[in-house]
Image (cartoon, rainbow, N blue to C red):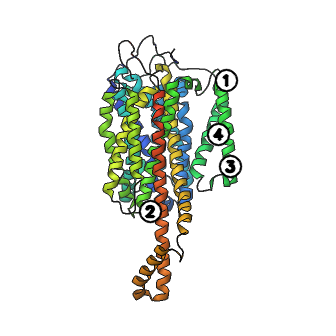
Amino acid sequence: MPETDTTEPAQWHPAHNPWVIAVSVMLATFMEILDTSVANVALPHIAGSLAASTDESTWVLTSYLISNAIVLPITGWLGNRFGRKRLLITCIAIFTVASALCGAAPSLSFLIIARVLQGVGGGALQPISQAVLLESFPPAKRGVAMSVFAMGVVVAPILGPTLGGWITDNYSWRWIFYINLPIGALAAFMSGMFVQDPPYIKRSHEPVDYIGFGLLAIWLATLQIILDKGQEEDWFASRWIFGLAVTSLCSMIAFIIRELCTDAPIVNLRILKNRNFAVGIFLMAIVGAVLYGTTAALPLFMQTLLGFPALQSGLALSPRGVGAFLFNILVGQLVGRTSNRMLIGLGFCFLTYSSFMLGRINLEVGVAYLIWPSVINGIALSFIFVPLTTTTMGHLRQDQLGNATGIFNLMRNLGGSVGIAAVTTIVARAEQAHQAMMVAHLTPYDQTYRDFLARAQAALAPHSGDWLAQLQAQGLLYSTLQQQATLWAFVDNFRLFGLLCLLCVPLVFLFKRVRRQRGIVVAH
């Protein structure tokens, strides 16, 4: 017996061409996703311009992520209460106005407040756009619709650091926010013209679940702060991080209980009874962790160990966007004609292979070696994202999509935050562990150590003298050891991502087939 009834009295179709609707909503989505990563490379410039420390400037990122995460899961409820079209246009307007305020910020505190407002406006844009696309296209074409959405989700985070670096270097960090103004105005105009509310979106006047919303806000805000500041504060060795962790765990449990017991939940968690949806959001969290984690780790490796400038290290990720862009269309056509489980499994195999390729890096690799793993990574994300989305939503009714897409996008973003936190933690902790193991070989009783020290001292002695050359040789040797320890930390990180992706392959077979509906194959 199916877990969720997929039989609908009538399939709703929009009055306008679905592709025009797709352009309307994707303008706003691409703008919002781009803004989650475009400010990263500009933080030193922002800190210098606003007389703030580098640590203080990171709240420019954290404040946006916190407000964004809180809004994501309640998007379905907001759409039902105020109308999805009205909510979409309002969020675009809030995001655009907040972007102008960010660009004009005279102080760091003003900028952080503006970023919170920007996160509130941007949080609903992704799930609304995804829900509108799924509803606007007929079931047989939903794979193509999700390929369009995937281009924004996959390509925008990759372009963000490169575009942000170029704008900051050539103009000013303020223009990374000002560029949103014309895009936001066009998106609001097109959404007002072409987006419609389906007939089952009836503005609800049920009482607001203030308790549930409060618990949700506390849970996600504390969790985001923990992930963002944990490594910097030595995780649970910090009393305030430990306190936030306890608060986050308790509020999460209380939130789940509250939403399952109340008659008018702000987030309908009962949808998790659907097996496809439950498996799908778990896999999407893994994809988010690998996507954002690799995006953070690879430029960091290139800058700290290979000496690449920020812009060039950002450009090294561009091939992933090219691979994703080219294969998204192909995969969109395959969805509904080929087994989705096979496509998703193949995608995770590609993702595993690309991660293990990066796990073979060394200090002598060139950019050419890093291009192919990035391309394969992009192809893998294309094979995963489109069929995973359609399969996850395949057993849901149209009126459930608004709530489902909010949870789906929240899990991807939370997975991304966990992935970035894992990268910073693994690199820092594994570097110390590898350094401790290798230091044991820096002893006069080790022949390799004596040979290296003698050669280095002989090369330096004509320029520095015997005594100073001996100190310089030891410093050179220790510096080499530190580089190797850091390299092994990155290797551990990429191999862990590869193992995580490999473990996801068997989970793909937990998906139920999405069968034919009225003679139309939705997915398999």
Residue 351 visible in image? yes
State how far apart marks 4 and 3 are (Cα): 15 Å
Residue visible at 51% across and 49% down in the picture:
420
How many numbered circles does the render carry? 4
State how far apart marks 3 and 1 are (Cα): 29 Å
Above/below status of 125 relative to 98 = above
Callout in the foreground (4, 2): 2
Q: Nearer the viewer, residue 513 or 69?
A: 513
Q: Nearer the viewer, residue 424 or 182?
A: 424
User: Mark 2 sits on what residue?
Assistant: 304
SS at circle 3: helix
The image shows residue 479 at horizontal and vertical percentages of 48, 71
Image quadrant for the C terminus? top left
State how far apart marks 3 and 2 are (Cα): 30 Å
Above/below status of 228 relative to 401 = below
User: Mark 3 sits on what residue?
Assistant: 242
User: Mark 1 sits on what residue?
Assistant: 261
Residue visible at 55% across and 54% down in the picture:
425
User: Mark 4 sits on what residue?
Assistant: 218
Dot 4 or dot 1: first in sequence order is 4
At label 3, the amino acid type is Phe
At label 1, the amino acid type is Cys
Relative to 57, is 100 on the left or the right? left
Label 3: how many residues lie within 10 Å, few (<14), some (14-19) or many (20+)? some
SS at circle 1: helix
